[in-house]
Image: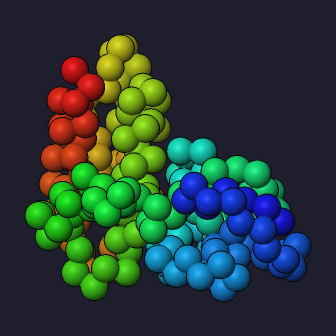
Amino acid sequence: MRFNINGTAVEVEADIRTSLLDLMRNYLGFTGTKKGCDQGACGACTVLVDGERINSCLALAVQYQGRNITTVEGLAANGNLHPLQKAFIEHDGFQCGYCTPGQLCSAVGMAGEIERNIPSVVTADLSSDSIAVDDTEIRERMSGNLCRCGAYNGIVEAISEALVQQTAVQT
Ligand code: FES
Ligand code: FES
């Protein structure tokens, strides 16, 4: 199978039944992506495929050949942390850190969804042209990523700050 992971082309021989999560962790050494439930319930395994967030434990690797996959290892660029990583540190957005790679990838994917004006299922105001990104909206959109340490307040603060910065850069 051939993939583009964090900007690098990789080729790997693996059982065709291997999940994308197991492929990254067990075959390619990208262990930043975590296995929590292995059944789509916790979000610890979240990665980005062509910018969209998915649970890699539910994805068969073979289906994602040729796609651009970003893991937590690919978020920092040129030795600089991603703005979200900085915000997580500043706002204590983690305790044990096990859920953090998934939270970060999910938040990056979420920011892209907001940029593309994709409404969330529960809080969407379909009469509005733009999405109001308040804490309720962030919590709803991040509800697929669980944190057993309960660091949710810091996580939401960090994402909120990073999204405000992102908006400021764009405008
Ligand atoms: Fe994939 Fe929990 S390990 S959702
Ligand atoms: Fe421990 Fe989230 S920081 S599970």
Residue plotted at (17% across, 68% down): 89
68 to the left or right of 131: right
Image quarter where the N terminus lies is bottom right
Answer whether residue 116 is visible to the viewer in this image. Answer: yes
Which color scheme does this rendered protein use? Answer: rainbow
Residue 140 spot, x, y in % from top left: 35, 48
Q: Nearer the viewer, residue 125 or 52?
A: 52
- Image quadrant of residue 136? top left
167 to the left or right of 118: left
Image quarter where the C terminus lies is top left
40 to the left or right of 159: right
Residue at the farthest front position: 78
Residue plotted at (78% across, 56% down): 65
116 to the left or right of 83: right
User: In this rendering, is residue 65 above or below 94?
Assistant: above
Q: Nearer the viewer, residue 95 or 150?
A: 95
- Image quadrant of residue 15? bottom right
Residue 64 spot, x, y in % from top left: 75, 56
Residue 20 spot, x, y in % from top left: 69, 69
Residue 170 spot, x, y in % from top left: 27, 25
Answer whether residue 143 is visible to the viewer in this image. Answer: no
Residue at the farthest left position: 90
Residue plotted at (51% across, 64% down): 71
Residue plotted at (59% across, 82% down): 29
Please state the total of marks drawn on the protein image: 0
- Image quadrant of residue 84? bottom left
